[in-house]
Amino acid sequence: MTDTQWPRFEVFLIEEDEKPAEHVGSVHAPDAEMALLNARDVFVRRPRCRQLWVAPSSKVLFRTAQELKDATTPPGNQLEEPQPYLVFSKPNHREPLTLSKCLSAGSAETALRSVLAGGYGADYPLWAIVSEADLTRSDPEESESFFEPAESKQYKMHADFPTGQLMKEVRQK
Amino acid sequence: MTEEERLQAFEARIARGEKIEPGDWMPERFRKQLIRMISQHAHSEIVGMLPEGKWITRAPTLRRKLILIAKVQDEAGHGQYLYHAAETLGATREEMLDDLLASRAKYSSVFNYPTLSWADVGVIGWLVDGAAIINQTMLAKSSYGPYARAMLRICAEETFHKKQGQEIVILLSQGTPNQKAMVQDAINRWWWPTLMMFGPHDSDSKNSPELMRWGVKTRSNDELRQVFVNQMIPDLHALGLSVPDPKLRYHEETGNWLIGPIDWDEFWRVVKGDGPCNRERLETRRKAHQDGRWVREAMAAYAEKYEGKGTSDRSNRSVRSV
């Protein structure tokens, strides 16, 4: 019965044009293009999404505060050609893991170290770092048609059902 | 640090209200319990599509059809959120799906009952999803970060499920004598299975003490069941409906509605695979999985052709996520 469910892709979502991307979960897909389609179906069943990004889970570095504290090995290979990295951070347990810094670095590990060295987010519980090159973004030109199925879906919000008012009317009868 | 010191530090974090994240140290038992609980929860969402999905083609109006499609689609999404949360603990999607299809995994016993009339769709929405919300609102405060986050998303959408169901029940209860009889019959059949959803009594729940000590759960099965009963009974009575419990009574001092004994023999029978629809539900899932095989193969072939890869990076177990 066993068959592969394909590699995992981490999913990042931008709710409104001016808001930063936040990590929402992961999907399985054979490639980035289909990961975007699956992410749309899983994470955009309600309105409010302007853009989706996906990156192979194997290319995203996650670090918790505890791991950073316990780390005894120095950060990885410094000799790599610097490239742009996106650093996501979670300020506390309520707020989401959100894009906070973009910078050039030799590796995901060094990107995170340099953000921390700058005094940013010393007590943050969670981080995710991904290289710009590993991200695939939904096409902003197509965002209207891409997210249209959720936008135009009817009767999907609880406010569509005035049950409080209906119960009140029954009780008054 | 010794194992004992680690455990103490871990429990102190939970006591401070911190969330445990995937890379953090955790007792093996905590990891195992969470994988068990979250994967069962995910399976429940997936199997939970079936009883209601059956009514999509028979919904009485276009509006009801659109609502039901949106709801069933949500359940599929909830299953995906939860499988993701279990994967952050090292479980793989392949193993979890295999366990479900090979009848090794459990899922909520309530989905092993048949949906015999349209009123069942209303009663499932209001009662079954209403009960689920009470449990999930608690789990949204769970000590494991990815589980709590999945629950927050799910709760927001479940409110829609509950209210669309309540609307159906209200309208039927105020309708023709036939409609009233139909909705009363649905409540009679779903009431006890819904109460069983909260799980065994606290005194018989072997997992509860550990889950509560580690902040995965913060309230006991019996406590949550009482919240649900107190919430439902006044509304059902206001609609002229009753529940099939001759021993139901109001307890003045505590303000609780006290229920009669639950048939735990039935509960365990259904959990162990002998409910009215257990076989049918798993057969349907297996068939869906088999029928989808050519689609998965076509997608893999497409990926292979256009990316020149698609078979690499399959070692999901070592891949971390939050």
Image: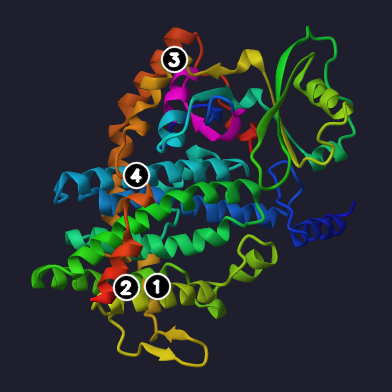
Residue stretch in magenta: A19-38
Q: Secondary structure at mark 3?
A: helix
Q: Is residue B55 left or right of residue A58?
A: left
Residue at image x 44%, y 53%? B104
Q: Secondary structure at mark 4?
A: loop
Chain under numbered label 3: B
**Mark 2 and mark 1 in contact (Cβ < 8 Å)?**
yes
Between circles 2 and 4, the one closer to the viewer is: 4
Chain under numbered label 1: B
Q: CA distance from mark 1 to mark 4?
A: 27 Å
Tag 3 and tag 2 share a subunit: yes
Determine which residue is flagged by label 3: B303
Q: Quadrant of residue B234?
A: bottom left
Asked whether the viewer can see residue A157, the reply is yes
- The disc, 3 or 2, on the residue closer to the chain's N-terminal end is 2
Q: Is residue B277 left or right of residue A15?
A: left
Name the kind of residue labelled 2 in the image: Trp
